[in-house]
Image (tube, rainbow, N blue to C red):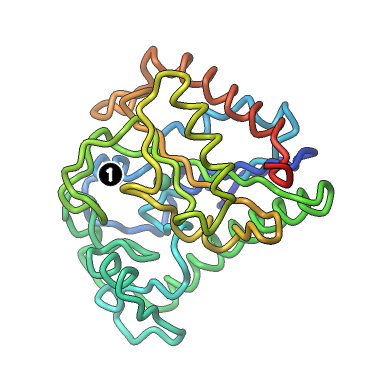
């Protein structure tokens, strides 16, 4: 039985979601490239780094399907026509920044890996892309929206941390700055449009206080999940947090390393800080 996501309801204003850590490769994926190459596209182990959160009353939404099957952090219009055997029947993005990602093969359904390798030896049918949307994208977004709406209804505000990880060095076909050596963390709020800048600053300062090198909105500003659900004027604050994988795993073997436990304690302190923060008084 295909299971797209794992969710835990919360009791606090805080919602965490992990769209890219899924490792359950669906039987109908039918990719042609090496599975290990696909695994490098995962934000592997991110769900383990935050596994303390539900016990603190934090709502949790986690994709179980892999990012290379469908990227839940993309809009439904980010369709790569070059991948399909027939014209897409729905609207297709025309924004230049979005189109550049789609042309790199990083739309809703990826055409190529970060190394530039084609995923498929065939075209995909419109029906199979629609089926992935119905089985993965729709339930994932419904769960994130429901968790944020519930938190907001209970508390009059919501805090949403969109959880990711990034390679130590951006790969050659990465969407934004190929070859860039990443900071320890990148905090993104799409230039203050998805969360109060003071809230993001609090997150940045907390992590810097723990000794980390932290970048803000560079090279990652945040993508569809924070764009869609962040609305600071309505006290709905969404922040994307990218963690450098070198802090917790071996990027070649994909195994967690000894750094993971210390990192987890620091993430717990960040979650506790967010639980103690009312953005209305920032
Ligand atoms: Zn990610």
Q: Is residue 128 left or right of residue 254?
A: right
Query: Residue 7 appears at what percent x and percent y?
Result: 66, 44
- Is the residue marked by circle 1 packed among few (<14), some (14-19), or many (20+) residues within 10 Å? few
> Residue sitting at 51 percent across and 67 percent down?
133
Q: Is residue 166 above or below residue 156?
A: above
> Residue sitting at 56 percent across and 52 percent down?
4
Label 1 SS: helix
Q: Is residue 23 left or right of residue 244?
A: right
Query: Residue 230 appears at what percent x and percent y?
Result: 59, 57
Query: Residue 125 appears at what percent x and percent y?
Result: 36, 76
Camera-side residue of 14 and 7 = 14
Residue at image mark 1 = 35
Task: Give the quarter of the image for residue 252.
Answer: top left
Q: Is residue 3 visible?
A: no
> Residue sitting at 48 percent across and 73 percent down?
130
Q: Quadrant of the C terminus?
A: top right
Camera-side residue of 119 and 195 = 195
Task: Give the quarter of the image for residue 153.
Answer: bottom right
């Amino acid at each position: 039985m295909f299971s797209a996501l794992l969710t835990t309801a919360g009791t606090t204003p805080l919602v965490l979601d992990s769209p890219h850590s899924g490792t359950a490769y669906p039987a109908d994926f039918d990719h042609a490239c090496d599975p290990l190459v696909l695994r490098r596209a995962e934000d592997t182990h991110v769900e383990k780094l935050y596994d303390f959160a539900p016990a603190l009353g934090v709502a949790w939404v986690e994709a179980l399907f892999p990012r290379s099957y469908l990227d839940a952090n993309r809009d439904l219009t980010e369709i790569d026509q070059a991948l399909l055997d027939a014209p897409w029947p729905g609207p297709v993005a025309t924004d230049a920044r979005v189109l550049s990602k789609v042309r790199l093969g990083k739309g809703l359904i990826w055409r190529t890996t970060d190394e530039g390798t084609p995923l498929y030896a065939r075209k995909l049918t419109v029906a199979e892309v629609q089926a992935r949307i119905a089985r993965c994208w729709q339930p994932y977004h419904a769960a994130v929206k429901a968790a944020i709406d519930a938190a907001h209804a209970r508390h009059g505000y919501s805090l949403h941390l969109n959880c990711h990880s990034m390679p130590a060095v951006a790969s050659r076909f990465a969407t934004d700055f190929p070859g860039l050596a990443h900071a320890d963390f990148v905090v993104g709020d799409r230039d203050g449009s998805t969360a109060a800048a003071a809230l993001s600053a609090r997150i940045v300062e907390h992590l810097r206080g723990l000794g980390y090198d932290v970048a803000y909105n560079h090279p990652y500003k945040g993508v569809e999940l924070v764009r869609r659900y962040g609305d600071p004027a309505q006290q709905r604050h969404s922040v994307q947090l990218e963690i450098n994988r070198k802090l917790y795993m071996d990027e070649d073997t994909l195994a967690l390393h000894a750094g993971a436990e210390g990192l987890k304690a620091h993430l717990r302190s960040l979650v506790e800080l967010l639980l103690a923060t009312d953005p209305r008084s920032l």
